[in-house]
Image: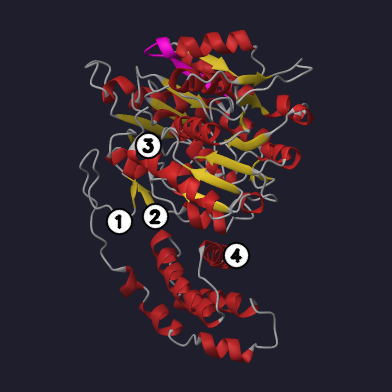
Amino acid sequence: MNLRYYQTDGITLCAQEFAKGFNSIVYQLPTGGGKTVIFTEISHRFIQRNNTSVVIVVHRNELLRQTRKKLFDQYNIIACEIKAGMKEIPPAQVYVCMVESLNRRVSKLKNIGLLILDECHIAVHNKIIDKLNAPLTLGCSATPISSNKKEPLKKRYQSLVKGPQISELIGHKYLCQNITYAPRTGVDRNSLQLKGGDFDEVEMGKEFSKPKFVINTVDAYKRWAKGTKTVVFNVNIAHSKCVLDEFINQGFNARHLDSNCKEEERIEILEWLKNTPDAILCNVGILTTGFDEPTIETVIVNKATNSLALWLQMTGRGSRIIDEILSKKIDTHEKYSFKIIDMGSNAITHGDWCDDRDWKDIFENPIKKAKNSVAPSKNCPQCEAILHASTMMCKYCNFIFPPREIATEELLNEYVILTKNIDVQKLIELNDKKKQYFTFFKVVREHAKAFKMAKKELNRDTFEFVLNACYTDCKRWCNLNDKKFNTWHKDLCLNELQTILKYEYRVLQENN
């Protein structure tokens, strides 16, 4: 089998990590990069060199069938499927199964040398790790952020092997370039209630199901994606059916899929999606991971989420390039890009799908709670595409952003003067008997105080300027305390500054 360069590199790096003595590692690779190709190749190499078996755990029936087919087609390996009703499990070189089927039959497995967990960020896999206790464990994920914040991946895995960035795969034409649109007519995510770290599904469903927002979703499709094969991620079943009805009422070819659909209906709907050029499939959490349909041209994220992992899993569904295009076998139905329509301001919060991310740092310093962040993005006022904040001309419609009349540095000159008096080392010395992080927060409060004294308007530009100045002093604090100024410290600084300034400026507005 011909592997891509990064797949070969990934397999080598995983082997090297195991050789170092790590018995549990995570391999990270963007959606569409071919994780199934990698872990089936690893399975093949493992059973050639060892007298023990491999267990591959997936979480969708489609993935189970796909994995078994890949093993047989490429390596002539007949994998044994562990499924409901099995009283005995026959000897096999490779077993393929879903979590619950394996969980009830772990004790029946013998001589297992390698456990492979696809989509290992899903916390339900943890019980398999505990019960099977395999000598080697390999977790695979495009987004190695645990779905259970109390059980970060670092607690289960000793090391992370990082694959290429999305932008690199796009550059080599292994993934499609995206164009992300964020209509200004969507739901205000700041008005949504939080529950368990993400938005309350019931309340969010009611808001997104309001007629004006349902109509806005269909209007956004008509404006940017009419006639394209589209997957729509909705909040819940009731909301999804509202959106479905509006698409149908306006004459579009749309269907709905959720977890209540029977297996035969699910298979039939996915086959319809595959073979219908203008299909619009409304779904609720069904197609977020492991779903492989390269002909999808548009992804509509019709919800808000505080989860970076979920945002990337949803949007990545449209990123695959059709294999026939790569092999030059066909000239029609070419797909070199796809569209993302973001109805929940997720790109502004988490960054665009194709942005580079430091997964090694995210793995080493897991975020304990989902947080909003100030992302370096902005909307084009002409076509509403999402762009990097520093962009001066829109690459999609050529809109030229006017230069700022007054530079932020000049606007905040008084603030700059005031913050020169912040002596981080002196603050540490004066408060040496207090808890260590007292002075860290003190630094942030001093910056917020200086900004308030400067009496300038709080907006994105001024906030980013203050935040960067605050980062500089917080980094100084970390250096003086022999700590690494990492993502965790950045988030600590960001959230403290946001909390103080939001409170202070709300108070000022109320007093006025």
Magenta residue span: 274-283
Q: Which of 379 and 63 is in front in this view?
A: 63
Q: Which of marks 1 and 2 is nearer the N terminus?
A: 2
| First along the sequence among labels 1 and 4 | 1
* Circle 1: element type: loop
At x 58%, y 22%, the residue is 64
Query: Of the numbered discs in the image, which one, if any, rests on residue 503?
Result: 4
Going by the numbered disc 2, the residue's amino acid type is Pro
* Res. 385 in view: no
Which residue carries the number 3 mark?
Answer: 181
Q: Viewer-proximal residue, 479 or 306?
A: 479
Amino acid of disc 3: Tyr
Q: Which mark is residue 376?
A: 2
The residue tagged 1 is 390
Q: Do the residues labelled 1 and 2 touch (CB within 8 Å)?
A: yes
Q: What element carries label 4?
A: helix
Give how far apart the Cα atoms at labels 3 and 1 are.
17 Å
- Residue 162: percent from the left, percent from the top? 45, 49
From the viewer's perspective, is residue 46 above or below residue 373?
above
